[in-house]
Amino acid sequence: MSGENTYYRLWKWSKYLMLSLWLSVAVSLSSCNEQAQGFGLPEGDVERGKTTYKSLSCNECHSIAGIEWEGGADTLKIELGGVSTKQKSYGELVTSVINPTHKIARRYMRKNTNETTNSGISKMRVYNEIMTVQELIDLVTFLQSQYKVKAPRTEYYPYLY
């Protein structure tokens, strides 16, 4: 009988232990603050961003419609802006400026281009020590204004009842 009694006591305590565990998990999850949504910096100025784009000589390697190209004949022209089916988010543009090696398009990683090193590191100058935060905000606002999003073309199949 003592074996059954011991089993009953263990079962009783394990029930309370599980209940305590679930309650503590519920309290922990309900007391957590909601996470911040999205990434954003203060509003920037498009005209100041255009001035920053020119003053940092971005147009020696990057091309934007309406801004004079200043790159050499042997420099690969990396086009920015234009019509695209994919939206460039604010965070993606900030990352591209402050960490140019983070994401490099495959077409620029070919060995015959002079835009990356052999190890795939971008040759873009790192502007983190040169550019002010306000210049970064204005530059990203300017770059974002250069992209126009269009819906991708899709083929719809007829829906038959």
Image: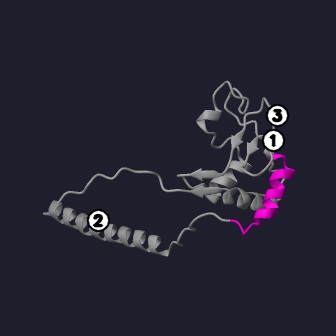
- Mark 2 burial class by Cα count in 10 Å: few <14, some 14-19, many 20+: few
- Taking the spot 41% from the left edge, 68% from the top edge, the residue there is 25
Looking at the image, which is closer to me, 103 or 80?
80
Q: Residue furthest left?
A: 1
Residue 14 tag number:
2
Give the magenta part as a residue range: 41-58
SS of the residue under disc 1: helix
Identify whether 140 is placed above or below 70. Answer: below
Q: Amino acid at mark 3?
A: Gly
Closer to the camera: disc 2 or disc 3? 3
Name the N-terminal-most of marks 1 and 3. 1
Residue denoted by label 3: 72
Whether the residues at callouts 1 and 3 have beta carbons within 8 Å, the answer is yes
Q: Nearer the viewer, residue 128 or 3?
A: 128
**Can you give x and y, in whole percent of width and height, for residue 154 in the image?**
40, 51
Q: Main secondary structure of the magenta part?
A: helix
Q: Amino acid at mark 1?
A: Glu
Decide whether residue 50 is among the magenta residues.
yes
Residue 100 seen in the current view: yes
Mark 2–mark 3 CB contact (< 8 Å): no
Q: Split into 4 quadrants, where in the image is the N terminus? A: bottom left
Residue 48: % across, % down: 82, 62
